[in-house]
Image: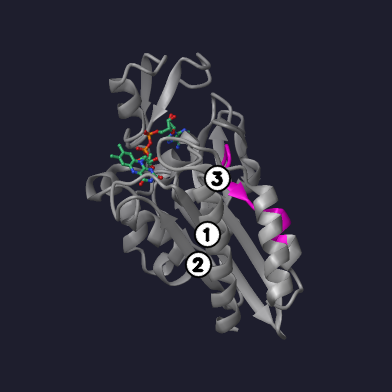
Amino acid sequence: MLAHVEGVWKPFAGGTDLMVLLEAGKLPHKNYLNIWPLKELRGIEITKAHVTLGALTTYTEVQNHEVLRQEFPMLCQAAKETGGIAIQNRGTMGGNIVNASPAADSPPALLAYDAELEFISQTGVRQIPYYKFHTGYKQMDIRADELLRAIRLPRATKKLAHYYRKVGTRKAQAISKTCFAAIGRVADGRVAEVRIALGSVAPIPLRCVQTETTLRDKAIDADSLAAAKAALAAEISPIDDLRSTRDYRLKVSLNLLEDFLQKLRLAA
Ligand SMILES: Cc1cc2nc3c(=O)[nH]c(=O)nc-3n(C[C@H](O)[C@H](O)[C@H](O)COP(=O)(O)OP(=O)(O)OC[C@H]3O[C@@H](n4cnc5c(N)ncnc54)[C@H](O)[C@@H]3O)c2cc1C
């Protein structure tokens, strides 16, 4: 259906983003394709190297999954802090990604875990690293004839520190002012591995590659902390909006970076 009449049908998963827009009269589409019953988009598969989540995996399923709780705790925390219980039962990981809100809560965790996305269409299967998916505000690398099928998370082979903080107005039903997710590992007193991603501070969920580069192979001390903070301040572009201000978002993002690095140093 998606391929035959391109751009006419819109996939409808949990509907928790779409229904808000539909009710507000902000959706140009008239035809919605209910993908909820597609079993090919469901389930959590475990292999030696990966954990693969079907795009229709809900937040409740994420939180209840033992391997995800053990190995991807930031994703479970993001799921726990998304909306309220009704949204967690119905909202899907795939919908969160393709809705492409810069304030969404799972994308920073998925970026820090270096997730890959798998798409399906009549022409076959396509895979890309998640950090290449968002190309601009609500712009992304998906065709109208494609469905997001799965999200693949590489399993870590070494013990990592995980740090996730959603800063919102309340503990539930809050849209992030800033959301920070990072993994790290220190070996021989230096940062051996680090991935940092933020939400609500740029037009897209942002993997902070420059900040990571300033930290890699460095000891965590006052100099590397200052360099990392300068890199992060240059890399993000927070704005004033109805939920927060540019200054607050910048300050909190830098504070969270410092807190993450201090915890990473102590965990070493
Ligand atoms: C009250 C409320 C609170 C919320 N709180 C939060 C929150 O705290 N944090 C947060 O991040 N989000 C929040 N959301 C937003 C929403 O719940 C999530 O983004 C959710 O994950 C969307 O998933 P869905 O399955 O409902 O998507 P849908 O609404 O069904 O779809 C969203 C978009 O993705 C597309 N799509 C969905 N699945 C696929 C697929 N497999 N392939 C291709 N395209 C697809 C649809 O066409 C649509 O464009 C909230 C929403 C509400 C109403």
**Amino acid type, residue under disc 2 in the picture:** Tyr
Residue drawn where x is 46% and y is 15% of the image: 8
Q: Is 217 positioned to the left or the right of 30 in the image?
A: right
Q: In the displayed structure, does residue 55 sit left or right of residue 172?
A: right
Question: What amino acid is found at the position of numbered circle 1 in the picture?
Answer: Ala
The stretch in magenta equals: 202-212
Q: Residue at x 69, y 77 (%)?
A: 221
Q: Which residue is mark 2?
A: 163
Callout 3 environment at 10 Å: few (<14), some (14 to 19), or many (20+)?
many
Residue type indicated by callout 3 = Val
Circle 2 crowding by C-alpha within 10 Å: few under 14, some 14–19, many from 20: many
**Residue 94 vs residue 137, the one in the foreground:** 137
Quarter of the image that includes the C terminus: bottom right
Measured in 3D between alpha carbons, the distance from the residue under mark 2 to the one under mark 3, in whole angstroms, is 17 Å
Asked if the residue at tag 3 contacts the one at tag 2, i.e. Cβ–Cβ closer than 8 Å, the answer is: no
CA gap between label 3 and label 1 equals 13 Å
Determine if residue 49 is in view: no
Mark 1 and mark 2 lie on one chain; the one further toward the N terminus is: 2
Instruction: Provide the residue designation for mark 3.
Output: 201
- Image height check: is 4 above or below 84? above
Is ligand 1 closer than 8 angstroms to the Cβ of mark 2? no
Is 207 contained in the magenta span? Answer: yes
**SS for dot 2:** strand
Residue at 45 percent of width and 20 percent of height: 1
| Residue contact between numbered discs 1 and 2, judged by CB atoms under 8 Å | yes
Pinpoint residue 11: horizontal percent, then vertical percent.
Answer: 42, 28
Q: Are marks 3 and 1 in contact (CB under 8 Å)?
A: no
The foreground one among 162 and 58 is 162
Image height of 260 relative to 168, above or below? below
Out of 31 and 122, give the one closest to the viewer.
Answer: 31
The residue that label 1 is drawn on is 181
